[in-house]
Image: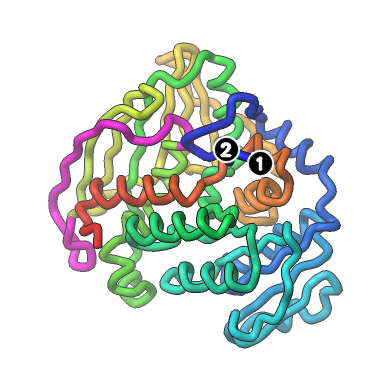
Amino acid sequence: MEEGTIFKQRDNDKVLSASELVARITASDFSDREVTVIGYGSMGKEYVKALRALGVKRIRVCSRSKGSLPELYDKADVETVVGGIENLRCSPRSDELGIVCTPMESLVDVTNLLVSLGFRHLLIEKPISLYSSEIKQLAEHMTRSEVRALCAYNRVAYPGVQEVRARVNVEGGITSCSYTLTEMIKPDWIQRFQKNELERWGIANSLHVISMAHTLIGAPQQWSGYRSNSLEWHPSGAVFTGSGISDQDIVFGYHADWGSKGRWSVEVHTSVASYRLCPLEAVLRKESSLAQWESIPILTYAPEVKMGIVEQVSAMLNPEISRCIPLVSLSDAAILTAYAEKVFGYSTH
């Protein structure tokens, strides 16, 4: 069955509002599902919280170091494996979900190891790789191996994005979009992140907002952009601006000034109203040019979990929910990364 993704939805897919999505998740039974999580850092912990919130009863967590694993020892629904994927001994069920949330540099290798163990159902943390060519190669390997593999862009599954998708659908569709990519740079980034990650920070981090915007408007089709200035750790530029049209014929523009005081945001417009996601977790709306932005209350299934994680995992576990939430295929991820390579002026190898 063809996978509905952020750039290609199936004709009979339904767009749910945030409240309808909560109702759909609440009505679903995940107790018989089985999930293996590789990596128990900050994201691994969020995935385990999400799985338990959904009522999954068979969770396996594999971590290279003991770290925080002891906090799971008294959980009857969680099995722990120490020593990394090399120590993982299991025969996965045909529908068992494997979630890969290891450090960025090992995502591709761990994914391939899970496939060799027999996993055919995978969710891989973004961006999978800092290079679009490597993502394309992995996508081809997954296709040959008949593996359903998707990339975990959790902001694509934000309830607020669902709400906007549902509302603009009723209002006749989006007519234009603008988004900002300004990073709120912290002084300790050089100590916290690896050099190659910082040099391609637009892929490592800014793709979060790019993925959200293009979930709403479609893939970039034709566009032109400019960049200027630079930072010590990001020599390709610090100011980025451009505009174009998506494959859904929606005009868009983007702007970023990493040396100034802006932040991430997405705005979309219809003939009826304008919508702003800023911060990205919130949704504002107005129906008049002179009106004030009004906040739209957004219902979430498990607010204690990092937003978008529960929604994304529920879609991976339930085919009916996956028809309502856009998921990022590896081909989509490669398209987004190739676009970012051009926006930010990165090499492709």
Q: Is residue 270 left or right of residue 63?
A: left
Residue under numbered circle 1: 322
Q: Which mark is residue 103?
A: none
Callout 1 amino acid: Ser
The answer to whether residue 234 is magenta is yes
Of labels 2 and 1, earlier in sequence is 2
Depth check: give the residue in front, 175 or 88. 88
Identity of the residue drawn at 16% across and 58% down: 230
The answer to whether residue 308 is magenta is no
Whether label 2 touches label 1, CB < 8 Å: yes
Depth check: give the residue in front, 303 or 339. 339
Q: Is residue 332 above or below residue 13?
A: below
Callout 2 crowding tier (Cα within 10 Å): few <14, some 14–19, many ≥20: some
Q: How many marks?
A: 2
Q: Is residue 276 left or right of residue 170?
A: left
Q: Which residues are magenta?
A: 215-236
Q: Which mark is residue 4?
A: 2
Callout 2 amino acid: Gly
Q: Tag 2's secondary structure?
A: loop
Quadrant in which residue 9 is drawn: top right
- Residue 264 location (% of width, % of height): 39, 45
- Residue 42 location (% of width, % of height): 57, 69
Q: Is residue 32 left or right of residue 342?
A: right
CA gap, disc 2 and disc 1: 8 Å
Quadrant placement of the N terminus:
top right
Q: Is residue 29 visible?
A: yes
Identity of the residue drawn at 66% across and 29% down: 17
Quadrant placement of the C terminus:
bottom left
Identity of the residue drawn at 39% across and 43% down: 210
